[in-house]
């Protein structure tokens, strides 16, 4: 029996993030925010949830961080897994594995014509829909992608991981990155874009023992 299909529910952490406002008590202790950055898994990151992953950070502050993995399409179409969200994406578009948190919740990442339609903006006009997707808003989206679950970090957790050698590698996201037609090649292409030693890392095989 297969896993239950993700439902278009709003993850609680995404809901909490959308309600944050500058100047509140929660924002007194400042962190260097990675919102709008891509985190590329380095060679020392062997956790199967994130190995060779590319994560778009949607929000990051002293309360923690959240994002979605961009390069893990699943062998199921959005139309089959979450039919109400099928009109948002191209025909037969795959559902993507967004991360290990709340995998039965659907997360919608989109490029917005009107920023006020977004529940949370990650960078430029790229952000997340929140809660029920209204037909009027859906018709104004430039493009969208649907994810099962998301990636989340508690207070200080991502900062600790960023300090680990060979772990996460940060690179500013570009508008085309979240909607790439070649997600399987995104990890290598972002490293090549970063250049230098990272360009060499991009050639590393999935199984280093085959090199």
Image (spheres, rainbow, N blue to C red):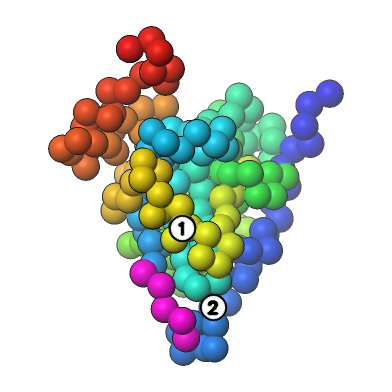
Quadrant in the picture for the C terminus: top left
Write down the region rendered in magenta: 28-32
x and y, in percent, of residue 203 in the image:
27, 23
The residue beneath circle 2 is 20
In the displayed structure, 107 sits above or below 127; it is above
In the displayed structure, 27 sits above or below 105; it is below
Residue 29 on the magenta segment = yes
Majority secondary structure in the magenta region = loop
Q: Residues within 10 Å of mark 2 (few under 14, many from 20)?
A: some
Q: Are marks 1 and 2 in contact (CB under 8 Å)?
A: no
Quadrant in the picture for the N terminus: top right
Asked whether 106 or 196 is in front, the reply is: 196
x and y, in percent, of residue 85 in the image:
63, 46
The residue beneath circle 1 is 160
Chain-order first, disc 1 or disc 2: 2
- How far separated are the C-alphas under marks 1 and 2? 23 Å
**Residue in the picture at 43% in, 33% down:** 52
Residue 92 on the magenta segment = no
Asked whether 108 or 184 is in front, the reply is: 184
How many discs appear?
2
**Residue in the picture at 50% in, 54% down:** 67
Which structural element holds mark 2?
loop
x and y, in percent, of residue 34 in the image:
38, 61
Which structural element holds mark 1?
helix
x and y, in percent, of residue 74 in the image:
59, 29
């Amino acid at each position: 029996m297969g896993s239950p299909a993700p439902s278009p529910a709003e993850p609680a952490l995404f809901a909490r993030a959308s309600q944050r406002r500058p100047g509140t008590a929660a924002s007194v202790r400042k962190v260097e925010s990675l919102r709008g950055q891509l985190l590329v898994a380095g060679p020392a990151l062997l956790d199967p949830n994130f190995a060779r992953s590319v994560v778009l950070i949607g929000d990051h502050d002293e309360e923690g961080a959240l994002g979605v993995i961009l390069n893990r399409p699943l062998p199921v179409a959005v139309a089959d897994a979450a039919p109400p969200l099928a009109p948002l994406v191209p025909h037969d578009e795959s559902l993507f594995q967004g991360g290990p948190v709340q995998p039965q919740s659907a997360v919608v990442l989109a490029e917005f014509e009107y920023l006020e339609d977004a529940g949370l903006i990650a960078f430029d006009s790229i952000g997340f829909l929140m809660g029920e997707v209204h037909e009027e808003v859906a018709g104004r989206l430039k493009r969208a992608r649907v994810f099962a679950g998301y990636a989340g970090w508690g207070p200080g957790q991502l900062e600790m991981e960023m300090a680990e050698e060979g772990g996460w590698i940060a690179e500013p996201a570009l508008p085309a990155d979240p909607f790439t037609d070649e997600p399987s090649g995104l990890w290598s292409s972002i490293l090549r874009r970063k250049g230098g030693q990272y360009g060499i890392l991009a050639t590393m095989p999935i199984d280093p023992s085959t090199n």
